[in-house]
Image (cartoon, helix red, strand yellow):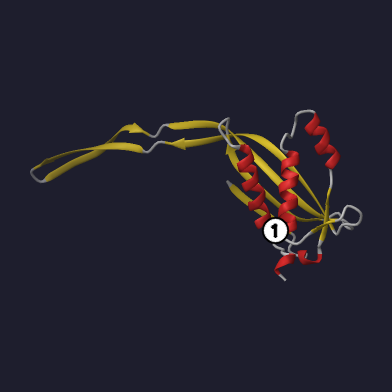
Amino acid sequence: MKTYSYKDKKVDLKQYKTYAWINLEHIEEDNRQGNKLYAKYILGLANQELIKKGFVLDVENPDAVFLFDTQIEKRIAYSQAPQVSVGIGMGGPGYYVGGAVPVAGGQISQKNYDEGVLFIEMYDTKTQNLLWRGWAQEEISYSTDLETDIQRAVQQIFMRLPVNHKGK
């Protein structure tokens, strides 16, 4: 799993102490339709991580709002097998002739796979400016333990949120 984040360099995130979520109606509707089956799970995990960082949920007048989304993207990876060569050499009195002849290898193979992406964004409620974005990407398949991967992704994303009100 790879995680990344972006923060507006001009903003001090320590001033944001309360939060709420936006697009919750969208999450409920997607969940009812069978889309975004893990939305409530992600929301619960994210709330736990924000509370650990000292944020307080305030749906009336929050300093910042968060939103999240998930995507599954089709990806293609290419790899090339190593080139294998055999050298041929001949020797004789006073001269040497040699060369290399490619025998095998160098084939390019293609692998199609799905990559799951979870991103979480933080916005200022007054300016609506993006303050911070964190996201995680990982190859997924039918054998992927989604609940474990989602839990790890949420934890790792919030580890990248550079604020901790409880650390004071």
> Residue at the spot x=74%, y=46% of the render?
44
At label 1, counting other C-alpha atoms closer than 10 Å, the crowd grade (few under 14, some 14-19, many 20 or more) is some
Depth check, front residue: 28 or 111: 28
Above/below status of 93 relative to 14: above
Q: The disc labelled 1 sits on which kind of residue?
A: Leu
Tell me: 100 left or right of 90: right
Residue that numbered label 1 is attached to: 161
* Element under disc 1: loop
> Residue at the spot x=82%, y=36% of the render?
28
Residue 158 percent across, percent down from the top left: 68, 54
Location of residue 43 by image quarter: top right
Above/below status of 105 relative to 134: above
Above/below status of 68 relative to 123: above
> Residue at the spot x=85%, y=59% of the render?
63
Depth check, front residue: 156 or 74: 156
Residue 66 percent across, percent down from the top left: 79, 51
Tell me: 24 left or right of 3: right
Depth check, front residue: 145 or 107: 145
Q: Furthest residue to the right?
A: 60
Location of residue 146 by image quarter: top right
Q: Furthest residue to the bottom?
A: 168
Residue 59 percent across, percent down from the top left: 88, 52
